[in-house]
Image (cartoon, helix red, strand yellow):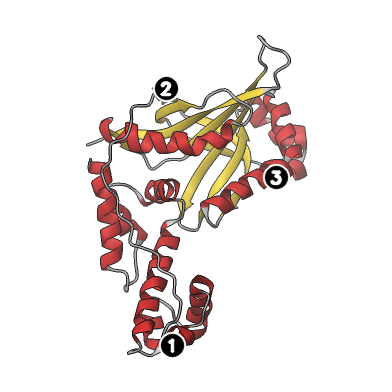
Amino acid sequence: MEWITGIQRAIDYVEEHITKELDYEKIARESFSSSFHFQRVFSILCGYTLGEYIRNRRLTLAGVALAAGRERVIDVALRYGYDSPDSFAKAFQKFHGITPSQARSKGANLKSFSRLSFRITLEGGTTMNYRIEKKETMVLTGFKRHFEGTPLDRKQQDHHFWMSTRLNQYILQGMARDCTTAYEVITNIGDDGYDFYIASKLNSWAREHFEEELGEEIASRFEHLPLQATTYLVCETEKCEYPTEKISDLYRKAVTEWLPSSGYEMADLPEVEIIHWYYNEDDPAVRQLRYVELWLPITEKK
């Protein structure tokens, strides 16, 4: 209940200040969470980022104002956060399909992006296997890319990143002596995207001799990523050929069904996903299967 109320408070705050400069930290505080995880959860639940929501709402209201025909284009542009008529015209045409001047014409066709409203609905009735685990400080070694754009864009970037970095992955597997486990880490989450790491867990000797074993040029592709000791909500996907396609639903279930009544809240720390490969020993004809562990950092509510 608190969590749903918090999300709605954040949306109401955005709508009340839609013509002003919006501070994402303040928006997140309205939802009783950090900006880091508010933006991540928002995009998972809604299918678009907070920035996209704000931009689409502003362009919708700008269209209404221009269709009324009582204001100059420049005045509407400035009210909804655009510093110049050119930048406003470009964004307006991309959203509405017509120019701001054409929007002033009688009978002009405009698009509307409606105000978001969260409601309490009857949900649940499904099973989610989970466990709560306290993890000590660990160090992963990996390489990263910054993902941007819509959730769909980021999903495509994720796929391309995995497919185009096979050599780096093989190097990590060799140094870790583990070909059946891969770590993904999501951190530095903001409205413009987040940093996404592909990583492995090396022993202390491998980390200490990393550059010596690989050479300076190859070792420079990677970095050691420390994760502080914390408590995680750990959930698992089913075992299947493409478990990464099920992560979004698992994440949504964890934060909308389990978290609100758990006595915990999200901690402002990186999220971890662990991909496990294995073969179905009961049926060798079945292709190699995988499952994913989702580690969400949590802390007890104060």
Q: Name the front one of labels 1 and 3.
A: 1
Q: Amino acid at mark 1?
A: Ser
Instruction: State the quadrant of the C terminus.
Output: top left
> In which quadrant will I find the N terminus?
top left
Give the residue at x 38% y 90%: 72
Which amino acid type is marked by label 3?
Ser
Q: Residues within 10 Å of mark 2 (few under 14, many from 20)?
A: few
Estimate the x, y position of residue 159 in percent, counting from the top left. 65, 44
What crowding class fits label 1: few (fewer than 14 Cα within 10 Å), some (14-19), or many (20 or more)? few
**Along the viewing direction, whichever of 26 and 44 lies nearer the viewer:** 44
Image check: 148 left or right of 105?
Answer: right
Q: State which tag comes first along the sequence, 1 or 3.
A: 1
Report, in whole angstroms, how far the alpha carbon at label 2 lies from the one at label 1.
57 Å
Residue 256 image position (x, y, % from top left): 34, 38
Residue at mark 3: 220
- The kind of residue tagged 2 is Asn
Above or below: residue 25 compared with residue 144: below
**Which residue is identified by label 2?**
129
Mark closest to the chain's N terminus, 2 or 1: 1
Q: Secondary structure at mark 3?
A: loop
Say what secondary structure mark 2 lies in: loop
What residue would you read off at disc 1?
105
